[in-house]
Image: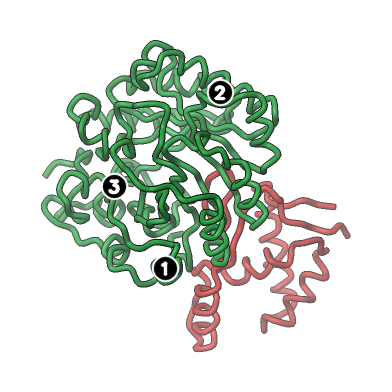
Amino acid sequence: MRNIRRNPDIIWREEEEARAEVVRAMERGDDASGEGTVLLVESGMMHQLNLLGGEIWKLLDGIDEERLVDTLAMTFDVDRDILARDIRDFLADLDRRGWLVHE
Amino acid sequence: MYMSRIPFSPITINWTLTFRCNFNCRHCYSRPEKAPELPTGQVKEIMAKVAKYKVPFINYGGGEPLLRSDLFDLTGYATGLGFNVSMNTNGFLMTEEKAALARESGFRTVGISIDSTKAELHDDFRNTKGSHKKAVSAAKFLKEQGVRLTISSVICRVNHMEFEELVRQARDLGAEQISLHNYKCAGMGFTNKDELDLTPEEWKEFYLKAIALREKVTDIRISMDDPITATIHKAPEQAIVKGSTCGKLSLNIRANGDVTPCGFIPVVIGNLLKDDLKDLWDNSNILEKMRNKKPKEKCLTCKHYEDCLGGCTARAYATTGDFNSPDPHCWVAK
């Protein structure tokens, strides 16, 4: 399985305060899946990722998909198959946008 | 998806390293401004303070950045701190050697100002003979060095009918992006607005055509950062805040370290030689007012207000002294 990295042309930043707020909301049982925790700037355009997307994004520094699932399964309390599917879909979307590099 | 909260610090710092300029343009927002210029050490001191808050982008505006003899030294320092650095220059002082220094010091992009495809028109607008030729040469020097190039054009009465030619010229020069900047009634731009600014109806016509072109063109990005366009098209996917981005995604630093919400709003909220960026960002009353505008006059009943938030705050402030006034470029009827 090939390792995956973030496209180095994409400038990004974790929004630490937003992330902390999302984590608190989730602990209260609120739905915060629409809240951005990572900002990306690509070709002058800005995008944001929600908590799961942001956690995946931060780990993409030369990691294969299976290890990515293993790592996130320790953080997110969801069925592993569902998590694996969500991660696969998310990576496919990033790939379509040209935001990933495969080694 | 819009952010439900403001980022924890600015995404971009627009930085006027100097108010000096070798040009005397008829629309210039900063020409009447005067401020002592900080020496290299103090600029670096501020850069280090800003870097602490993970601001990803610095863009030098001006004044003409190439008049600072320490420009590439400062840029090398800034890129070493992790900033992505760009600048807007008139290009007159760009040489092959300086283009090489731009690459070596780590400029992410360099923007050249070109306001017409017709040399005599550009030279007249910029009040400098030979400036179009020099701007084109500057673009070529930068491309030869592999520096990413953008072109900036201030849309006004002299060029609003030829923006398609401006896009073609930028593409021919190898630019990745052309920014079609809206005319700002600040500084000389305010003095000369009756001569140079378009009517609201002309702005609408321009934006309708320019947005249509942007949707067709694939080999160059066309940027039009004007909140008023929210009244005629759906906000693009990448818009993460509504209304003006000043004070929500960006701040402006002047030559003496003073901080203003944007280059076009001459209201000082602090100075980074003594103040903390994060403290200003979180606690400035001025920024709070800009982030929480209240509709007035025709905006009170306008169905577009929730998308445009009154349009450009700088234009409203320049013409009325009130952030909440409707954007004078707004074409939506009362």
Report the chain holding disc 2: B
Chain in green colour: B
Q: Secondary structure at mark 1?
A: loop
Asked if residue B127 lies left or right of residue B95, the reply is: left
Going by the picture, which residue comes out furthest to the right? A1
Q: Earlier in the sequence, mark 2 or mark 3?
A: 2
Packing grade of label 2 (10 A; few <14, some 14-19, many >=20) is some
Q: Which mark is residue B171?
A: 2
Q: CA distance from mark 2 to mark 1?
A: 42 Å
Vertical position of residue B1 compared to residue B152: above or below: below
Q: Earlier in the sequence, mark 1 or mark 3?
A: 1
Q: Are marks 1 and 3 in contact (CB under 8 Å)?
A: no
* Residue annotated with mark 1: B275
* Residue annotated with mark 3: B312
Have a look at marks 2 and 1 and say if they share a chain: yes
Residue in the picture at 49% in, 69% down: A35
Q: Is residue B4 visible?
A: no
Q: CA distance from mark 2 to mark 3?
A: 28 Å
Residue in the picture at 42% in, 37% down: B63
Q: Secondary structure at mark 3?
A: loop
